[in-house]
Amino acid sequence: MTEPIIQFKHVEKRFNDQTVIPDLNFTVNKGEFITILGSSGSGKTTTLKMINGLITPSAGEILIDGQKLRDLDLVKLRRHMGYVVQQIGLFPHMTIGQNIAVVPKMLHWDKKEINNRVKELLSLVQLNPAEYMNRYPQQLSGGQQQRVGVARALATNPPYVLFDEPFGALDALTRMELQREVKKIHESLAEKTFMFVTHDINEALFLGQRVMIMHEGRIVQFATPEEIVRHPATEFVEQLLGTIRQNQDLWRQQYE
Ligand SMILES: Nc1ncnc2c1ncn2[C@@H]1O[C@H](COP(=O)(O)OP(=O)(O)OP(=O)(O)O)[C@@H](O)[C@H]1O
């Protein structure tokens, strides 16, 4: 059964006198993996940050699990929302284990529980706990650091995880590997809602059970990857799909 978990109702966002999001309406259901795709400046990050309260809407209503976001305690809300960004910001003077344990510690989990959780999460993101727990962030590759970022976001078992271009700076192969991992993690953790911002159409279509395509602050299509590929709703969506073909053509021309 579908259960609405994040709802935007006539949400508007203005920065100074510039309206970047005029009227946003959508519903995400519990357990969905949603990707948000769009060109630069289309409002993807603004939308994501309105979900965890880092940005406040200028008008309209956001409901989280049926409750008005503006009535919620934002500190508590954020503890229920994992957040993974491109510059993951691991604390350089803390070990990987300590980095993952920051929020559980704040919540006064006991030492043994934290230790077990750190090991469990490192295994989940395919990093051997014995090898990585006591290393420092600078002793890890960019891809490994992003894995730690994903582990840290999942530390307190939040029902929602928000991703903002987390793999944007990684090389293509590492990126693909991490996309597969994140997809597997979503499948293995029942009922977690993932919202994932990207400007890479391949990533959006591969990861999203539904893909929200944004253009100039509006949703131009919000549908399954199959529906988008079969029936692009606008010329902009067609152009996006066209970039996949163009890349393939470029590649072929070069080597034929
Ligand atoms: N704090 C701010 N003050 C003023 N304008 C802002 C602010 N944050 C975002 N904007 C503007 O809002 C619009 C949407 O920005 P947003 O970061 O949401 O886009 P995006 O789709 O995530 O882009 P990108 O893919 O480049 O990160 C842009 O025109 C941006 O300049």
Image (cartoon, grey):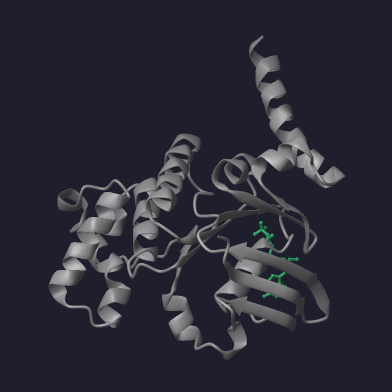
Which quadrant of the rendered structure holds the N terminus?
bottom right
- Taking 240 as reference, is 71 left or right? left
- Taking 94 as reference, is 63 left or right? right
Count of marks placed on residues: 0
Between 102 and 33, the residue placed more toward the observer is: 33
Query: Where is residue 29 shown, x and y percent of the image?
Result: 58, 63
Q: Which residue is drawn at 15% across and 74% down?
A: 111
Rendering quarter of residue 56? bottom right
Rendering quarter of residue 174? top left
Q: Which residue is drawn at 66% across and 66% down?
A: 27
Is residue 93 in sight in this rendering?
A: no
Q: Which residue is drawn at 39% across and 50% down?
A: 185
- Taking 75 as reference, is 254 left or right? right
Relative height, residue 230 to residue 73 (above, below): above
Which quadrant of the rendered structure holds the C terminus?
top right
Outermost top residue: 256
Query: Where is residue 91 shown, x and y percent of the image?
Result: 33, 68
Query: Where is residue 76 shown, x and y percent of the image?
Result: 44, 83
Query: Where is residue 153 shown, x and y percent of the image?
Result: 39, 64
